Every structure is written in structure tokens, then in C-alpha cells.
Image: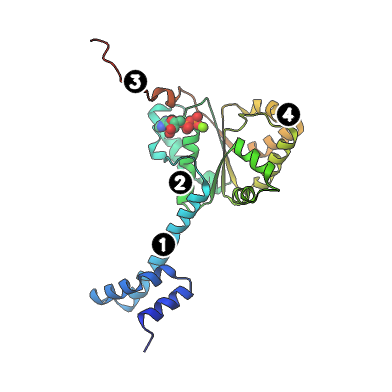
Amino acid sequence: MGGSVEQLQAQFHQLRMSETSKELPSFLRKAELKSWTYQELLHEPLTYEEKRREEKMIEKHLKWAKFPYEKSLDEFDLGEQPSINNRQLKQLQELSWLDQVFNLIFLGPPGVGKTHLAIGLGLEAIQHGQRVAFISMGELVSLLKTEENIRKAQLRLKRIRDADLVIIDDLMYMAMDQHEANLFFHLINHLYERSSIILTSNKGPEDWGELMGDQGITTAILDRLLHRAEVIHLNGSSHRIKHRQTVFQSKNVQN
Ligand code: ADP
Ligand code: MG
């Protein structure tokens, strides 16, 4: 006769099927109760183990992505953003640009939904098993500059370099010096043709040059970023301002 339930659990654990190990007593109870076939008794725990692994991987990837907030594409109101239509959004949501290692560049003034769209697509990619890293440009430059000395920066940059999709938020809100532009170039060069990049910026590529200082580096960075890229212009007025919260009670002016 085979081992006790505890022994079987230990064996599953040893074989790294920890979820099955934990749930084994419940599976055995159900098997008896519902007279599972042998096949069902194998199928149920294996399917459960797979599902739990996938869920745990998604949880891990969500943690690693470091989104500033989590808002889905379903929460994006197309009625408020006339520059992009339902069909285009659906196409982006299908993620074929990610499979083809295309970059996306969201341009437009503040508050039009650039970061929201980037995060929504990032969440979508994670649900499809991809690794995503979100970082603001300011934070990225400071990570790159401290990489040699700070272990936390090394780990974060490793996750960025290994990601399938890197979201760089608010590119060029600051001017970079030559050293910073160089570090940025090396990162972009590493990601080039290996990972997709989503950039958000309130300035167009034609203005990026002056903010990166050196013309040679700027050209090299732009070449790689724009080689396979879809540029999406978002216009309209700021959602933040339209939906501004106020500390004052709204007064009925007629009274
Ligand atoms: P940007 O990055 O372009 O400055 P955000 O994406 O951060 O703007 O948007 C600002 C806020 O407004 C966020 O809370 C975002 O969720 C919300 N927002 C912007 N556009 C929309 C939209 N079309 N539908 C729903 N929420 C929106
Ligand atoms: Mg933003």
C-alpha cells in the first residue's frame, strides 16, 4: 500500500507541487464523495497546480512592475479621449505590437490619459504572462547613476532589462547631461529589438534632441526608439482638471 496522506503531501512538496500538497486532503475527499475516475483524480490536482502557478506568477509580475497605480483599459473612457477610437484601443489591447516587439509612444499634454493607457496595457500584458517594468524617466536616470553602488538600484534595473515591456513615463521632463544621456542610450540599446518600450511624453521627438544635449547620442537613441514604433497623439483637455475635486461645497447659485 502507498503512503499516508501526510507522506504523499510531503512527496508532492518535495517535487515542488506545493499547491497540490496543501490541497491533497481536499482532493481525496472530493474524489471519494464524487466517485472520481482515476483519470479525474490526476487531472484535477494537475490543473489546479497549473492554475495556481499562473496566478502566483501574475501576482509576482504585478509586484515587480511597480505601477504607480493600477487602472485598466476598461476604466479608460473613450468618450473623453477623441484622439483614439474603440477599434484602435482594441487593437492595442490584443498586444500583437508586443509580440512583434514594437514600441508605442504616447504624446500629448498633461492629464490626457497617457500614463493611464500605458498602465492599462501593462496590466493586460501581465495577464498574458509577460514581464513588465514601469518607471518614470526621472527615477530611471537616478537608478542608472547609482547602479554601481546601490544594490536596490541593481535589482530594479535587472528587472527593467529583463522585462518584455518597459514603460518609461514622462520622458524628457528634464534635461539630461552627457553622462546621463550615455547611460540612457546603453539601456535603450540593450532593450532594442528585445523588449517593447512604451514612452509617454508631453514633448514630441523633434524636441527630445535639445533635452538630451549631445546630438550624436540623441540620434542614436531616437533611431532605436522610433525604428519600429507607433506614435499616438492624444489631445483634448485634461481629465484631471475636468474632474477636479474641490474642497468647497458646490453652492446653488440661484439661492
Ligand atoms: P497623463 O499621463 O497624460 O498626464 P494620466 O494618464 O495620468 O494623464 O491621467 C490623469 C488622470 O485622469 C488619471 O487618474 C487617469 O486615470 C484619468 N484619465 C485621463 N484620461 C482618462 C479617460 N479618457 N478615461 C478615464 N480616466 C482618464
Ligand atoms: Mg503621466
Q: Where does label 4 land, which residue?
A: 213
CB of mark 4 within 8 Å of CB of mark 2? no
Residue at mark 2 to residue at mark 3: CA–CA distance: 38 Å
Q: Amino acid at mark 4?
A: Gly
Between disc 3 and disc 1, the foreground one is 3
Q: Amino acid at mark 2?
A: Glu
Judged left or right of residue 162, residue 13 is left
Q: Position of residue 150 (x, y in %)?
A: 66, 48
91 to 162, vertically: above or below: above
The answer to whether residue 178 is seen in the rendering is yes
Q: Earlier in the sequence, mark 4 or mark 2?
A: 2
Residue at the top extreme, as displayed:
254
Between disc 2 and disc 3, the foreground one is 3
Q: Secondary structure at mark 3?
A: loop
CB of mark 1 within 8 Å of CB of mark 2? no
Q: Where does label 2 land, which residue?
A: 124
> Split into 4 quadrants, where in the image is the C terminus?
top left
Between disc 1 and disc 2, the foreground one is 1
Judged left or right of residue 69, residue 39 is left
Q: Position of residue 231 (x, y in %)?
A: 56, 33
Q: Earlier in the sequence, mark 4 or mark 1?
A: 1
Does ligand 1 reach within 8 Å of label 3's beta carbon? no
Q: Amino acid at mark 1?
A: Arg
CB of mark 2 within 8 Å of CB of mark 3? no
Q: Earlier in the sequence, mark 2 or mark 3?
A: 2
Q: Position of residue 128 (x, y in %)?
A: 47, 52
Q: Position of residue 22 (x, y in %)?
A: 38, 70
Q: Where does label 1 land, which residue?
A: 52
Q: Secondary structure at mark 1?
A: helix
Q: Residues within 10 Å of mark 1 (few under 14, many from 20)?
A: some
